[in-house]
Amino acid sequence: MTVLITGSRGKVATTLIPLLREHGIAVRAASASPDKLTVPAGVERVVCDLDDPATFPAALAGVESVFLYANPHHIEAFLAAAKAAGVQHITVLSSSSILEPGADTNAIAAMHSAVERGIERSGIEATFLRPGAFAGNALGWSWTAKSAGSVDLPYPEAQSSPIHEADIAEAAFAVLTRPELRGRAYHLTGPASLTAAQQVAMLAEATGRPLTVNPVSAEAWKASTAEFMPATVADALLGYFASHEGHPDAVTQDVDELTGHPARTFASWAGENADAFRP
């Protein structure tokens, strides 16, 4: 079996690729810039830019299974190329945002829903991994944590169940290597619902230095993200934060079911990444 991994520069993919190779599975690491990839020995690097359909046929040739980042822009062309290549199964890195109330008007949910619906129409067997907040999202706080010892939060009591990216990779590995797990949707979460302020406190403990929460308005937070985040995505996140202010997020056992171990804690992620939050 040859597995094509799209988005191979991402944190999930860079953990998944070595897992597959360690178990003797042929891996094709795909990226818009494959020359920038660092991959284990024996892993083929190929050009596959999800914004450029011309790169799809060569990347998919001879592939039986795909790990796909959700990009709706050319999903129909990608699926047509996958069918022509004889792809048998697609594992999609989707999002639990599609399970939230108001998903129809949420830009993040709409992107992932478009990909899921397209794959369902294609007839290719698919498995949808729907994680919520990544633990690594906290890296967005690192600059002010390092420079000012504080984190700006529009909704400090908004709760999420942050999941360690290694757990997503291991869940994907299970689905890619165990056919009996396929054809389902899995809601992947961390082991506990935490407020944003609690996550900051865990980072402070991990770094051994105080970190304060600086409450800011939604407007100020959106303005601070304008250089690197589309306004529609910022609005979707603010809507999520507001709806989860003071309300526990869902916690599932799907990571346990797929990997055979409890989901890693946010505290463990904080310990592994503490240097990113130190001056």
Image: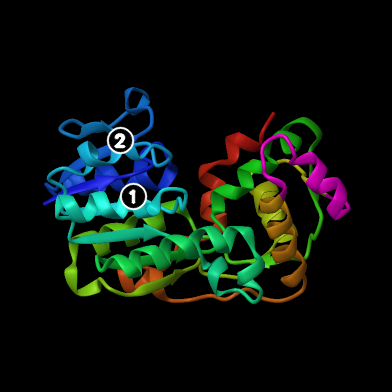
Task: Tell me: 88 left or right of 101.
Answer: left
Q: Residue at x 25, y 69 (%)?
A: 123
Q: Residue at x 79, y 40 (%)?
A: 224
Q: Residue at x 75, y 39 (%)?
A: 226
Label number found at residue 55: 2
Residue 208, quarter of the rendered image: top right
127 shown above or below 138: below
Q: Residues within 10 Å of mark 1 (few under 14, many from 20)?
A: some
Task: Tell me: 184 left or right of 214.
Answer: left
Q: Which residues are magenta?
A: 214-231
Query: Where residue 198 sits: x, y (%)?
Result: 71, 60
SS class, disc 1 = helix
Q: Amino acid at mark 2?
A: Thr
* Magenta region includes residue 226: yes
For marks 2 and 1, give the CA distance: 10 Å
Query: Where residue 158 sits: x, y (%)?
Result: 74, 65
Task: Tell me: 220 left or right of 63.
Answer: right
Q: Could you say which is closer to the camera, residue 193 or residue 206?
A: 193
Residue 7, quarter of the rendered image: top left
Whether residue 104 is visible, yes or no, is yes
Total count of labels: 2
Query: Where residue 259 sits: x, y (%)?
Result: 31, 66
Q: Do residues under tags 2 and 1 come within 8 Å of each other at their CB atoms?
A: no
Q: Residue at x 69, y 52 (%)?
A: 232
Residue 127, quarter of the rendered image: bottom left
Query: Where residue 108 sits: x, y (%)?
Result: 59, 58
The mark that comes first in sequence, 2 or 1, is 2
Q: Could you say which is closer to the camera, residue 277 or residue 1?
A: 1
Say which quadrant the C terminus sits in.
top right
**Mark 1 sits on what residue?**
77
